[in-house]
Image: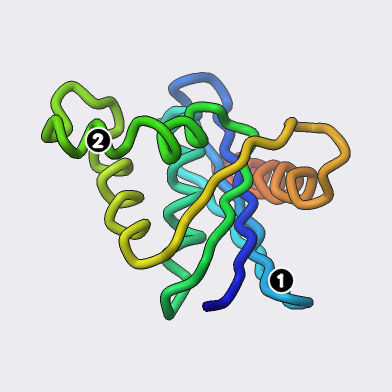
Amino acid sequence: MKQIRLTTDGACIGNPGPGVWACVLRYKNQAREMSGAEPGTTNNKMELLAVIKGLRTLKEPCSVLIRTDSRYVRDGIMKWIHKWESETWIRIKNRQLWQEIERLQRMHRVSCEWVKGHANDVDNKRCHLLAHAAARSVNDKRL
């Protein structure tokens, strides 16, 4: 099984407001970067979308270490998601996004770790830069 490292980040200008997401996937010496933006969203949705976009790119079952500076994402994946599923997703914010993460998790062996944002983690810094570039492109299109 391929060992993939998926580092993710999401941000929002205002909350809600224009949002951006970014991720860096690493497999051995290869890296793939992705980012995007959406109008009228929240920070948590963008954090979740970064995970979803990264997992969707994988074409075969993999062992995936998700690295995030969002405790919401880490705790959701590692602690809460199985409880929510057993409770039929009642009263869960961002339910559709969490359900998509849960569906994608079944295809892979997923673990998750929290990394300190804006610290010395190279991929976290890169995600932050990618997200800001996506935010600038959204602002440029509005002019």
Q: Is residue 79 above or below residue 49?
A: above
Which residue in the protein does label 1 denote? 31
- Residue 143 makes an appearance in the image: no
Q: Kindly indicate the quadrant of the structure image that contains residue 41.
A: top left
Of the residues shown, which amino acid type is indicated by label 1? Ala
**Which numbered circle lies on residue 95?**
2
Q: Residue at x 44, y 41 (%)?
A: 48
Q: Residue 79, located in which quarter of the rendered image?
A: top left
The C terminus sits in image quarter: top right
* Residue drawn at (32%, 37%) of the image: 81
| Residue at image location 72% in from the left, 42% down from the top | 128
Q: Residue at x 64, y 34 (%)?
A: 69
Within-10-Å neighbours for mark 1: few <14, some 14–19, many 20+: few
Residue 40 location, quadrant: top left
Q: Secondary structure at mark 1?
A: strand
- In the foreground, 87 or 99: 87
Q: Position of residue 90 (x, y in %)?
A: 14, 26
